[in-house]
Image (cartoon, grey):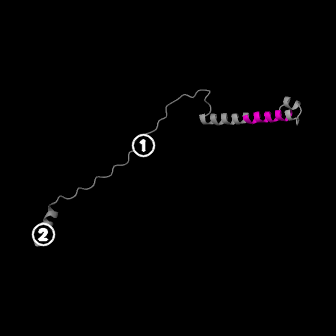
């Protein structure tokens, strides 16, 4: 038992000391994002998203006007409206 204790004590003192942990490195910063330099054409005044939104709005407005015109034509055919209603603006 004494021999085991002496052997353990000797092995602990003869082992090399643990090396200190290296200092943590600072986190690298993300690379800078560079946008390509693009000259804006005179026709590109608005963003693409705004152009798509406007086109959708115009399509919807045209569909509403077309539907209104069809309703007026149906009213003339059914006799609810006179023929003059087709010739005047809504």
Q: Is residue 90 visible?
A: no
Q: CA distance from mark 1 to mark 2?
A: 56 Å
Q: Disc number at residue 30?
A: 1
Tell which residue pokes out farthest to the top in this image: 42
The one of 34 and 72 positioned closer to us in this rendering = 72
- For residue 20, above or below residue 62: below
Task: Based on the picture, tell me whether residue 73 belongs to the magenta stretch.
Answer: yes
Classify mark 1: residues with Cα within 10 Å, few (<14), some (14-19) or many (20+). few
Instruction: Please identify the dominant SS of the magenta region.
Output: helix
Q: Considering depth in this image, is 59 or 16 the residue closer to the camera?
A: 59
Q: Where does residue 14 sit, x and y in percent of width and height?
A: 14, 61
Q: Considering the numbered disc 2 on the image, is that residue within a helix, a strand or a loop?
A: helix
Left or right: residue 18 compared with residue 82: left
Residue 18 image offset from top left, x and y in percent: 22, 58
> Which one is earlier in the sequence, the residue at label 1 or at label 2?
2
Q: Quadrant of the N terminus?
A: bottom left
Query: Regarding mark 1 in the picture, which secondary structure is present there?
Result: loop
- Count residues near mark 2 (Cα–Cα under 10 Å), then give few for <14, some for 14-19, many for 20+: few
Q: Magenta segment range?
A: 63-76
Does residue 78 appear in the picture of this structure?
Answer: yes
Q: Which residue is mark 2?
A: 4
Please give the name of the residue rendered at 46% of the width and 38% of the height, measured from the top-left corner.
33
User: Is residue 27 part of the magenta span, yes or no?
Assistant: no
Q: In the current view of this chain or complex, which residue is farthest to the left?
A: 3
């Amino acid at each position: 038992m004494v021999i085991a204790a002496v052997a353990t004590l000797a092995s602990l003192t003869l082992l090399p000391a643990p090396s200190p942990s290296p200092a943590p490195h600072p986190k690298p910063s993300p690379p800078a994002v560079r946008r390509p330099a693009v000259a804006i054409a005179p026709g590109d005044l608005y963003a693409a998203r705004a152009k798509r939104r406007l086109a959708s709005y115009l399509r919807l407005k045209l569909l509403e006007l077309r539907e209104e015109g069809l309703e007026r034509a149906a009213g003339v055919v059914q006799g609810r409206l006179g023929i003059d209603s087709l010739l005047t603006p809504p």
